[in-house]
Amino acid sequence: MTRVAAIDCGTNSIRLLVADVAVPDSASGAGATDELVELDRRMTIVRLGQGVDRTGRLAPEALERTFAACREYAEIIKEHGAERLRFVATSASRDAENRDEFVRGVLDILGVEPEVITGDQEAEFSFTGATRELAGHEHLERPFLVVDIGGGSTEFVVGEEHVRAARSVDVGCVRMTERHLVAGGAVTDPPTEEQIAAMRADIEAALDLAEQSVPLRQARTLVGLAGSVTTVSAIAQELPEYDSARIHHSRISRDKVREITEWLLHSTHAERAAVPSMHPGRVDVIAAGSLVLLSIMERTGAEEVVVSEHDILDGIAWSLV
């Protein structure tokens, strides 16, 4: 077993996974399987992408929130004695003019340079993390469509054991909220029908773009990743608190996703904040994220989504061995 640490820094959150990972060699015998034993998994909302869509730059306060989380993660990695560390940065830091400032700060704190990966690389990691453990689930039809709904972008990946096609498009819960649901410097509470219609049109245009290179409708099983999807699952199950074990591999019907999305789009900040499984950092962006999920299900005809807690972090961890 190799002890590794993986960090995924996205537009809305920064996440850490420390795990023991083993890939059997050819001498291990026919029954040997890959194994990932999770030691620590955590997430901090830092909103690194705050204002990037509008200004093209990472805000100073967003950088400081991110660096504070990195300092905390550095202590955890040291305590666990991880042998290898990989830090992957995604949409917000790809788009920012001042991303060198971000890179220098992470290097100073963690001793590794963040890899500002492409959307296609992000999709590869997400697919591996989400599907590697589904290999033994013969009742799930192939090919898979893995969708990772992030803060700034959404990744679409179709494949069986390996990726067949992938595409990243600039539609995510933070970007859609800032672009369509903000007026006068604050999130509209609740959104107007005109705002919702504009957001729907933007999402549909992004799906058109994704479908140019990824055969979305050929997939037989939809696998949904990241906080928007897992939060919808928690709401659907009426969980008294966020419960990763009950969310992982749960299945949510399209009708249920539509019902939740309609409620989120027409609820107030206080009503959303009162949901016991809702992370405070998702209250303002969950409606947009849920609409992205619903739009994908309607476009592909998926009757349900299989929710996975294992995603790009697990893919990064696997890449270290």
Image (tube, helix red, strand yellow):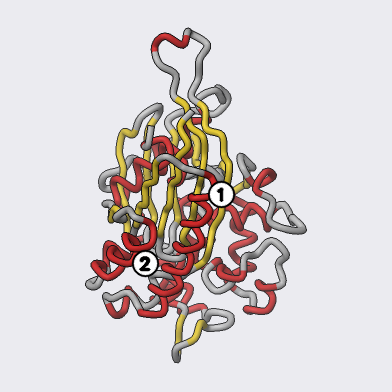
Disc 2 to disc 1, C-alpha distance: 33 Å
Q: Are marks 2 and 1 in contact (CB under 8 Å)?
A: no
Q: Is residue 67 above or below residue 256?
A: below
What is the x, y in percent for residue 208? 32, 54
Identify which residue, 104 or 257, lies in the foreground: 104
Q: Residue at x 46, y 56 (%)?
A: 74
Helix, strand or loop at label 2? It is: helix
Helix, strand or loop at label 1? It is: strand
Residue at image mark 2:
202
Indicate which disc residue 41 carries.
1
Whether residue 102 sits left or right of residue 318 in the image: it is: left
Q: Is residue 203 above or below residue 4?
A: below
Q: Residue at x 77, y 58 (%)?
A: 240
What is the x, y in percent for residue 268? 64, 79
Q: Disc 2 residue type?
A: Asp
Q: Disc 1 residue type?
A: Arg
What is the x, y in percent for residue 91? 33, 60
- Graded by Cα atoms within 10 Å as few (under 14), some (14 to 19) or many (20 or more), the crowding at tag 1 reads some
Q: Residue furthest bottom?
A: 184
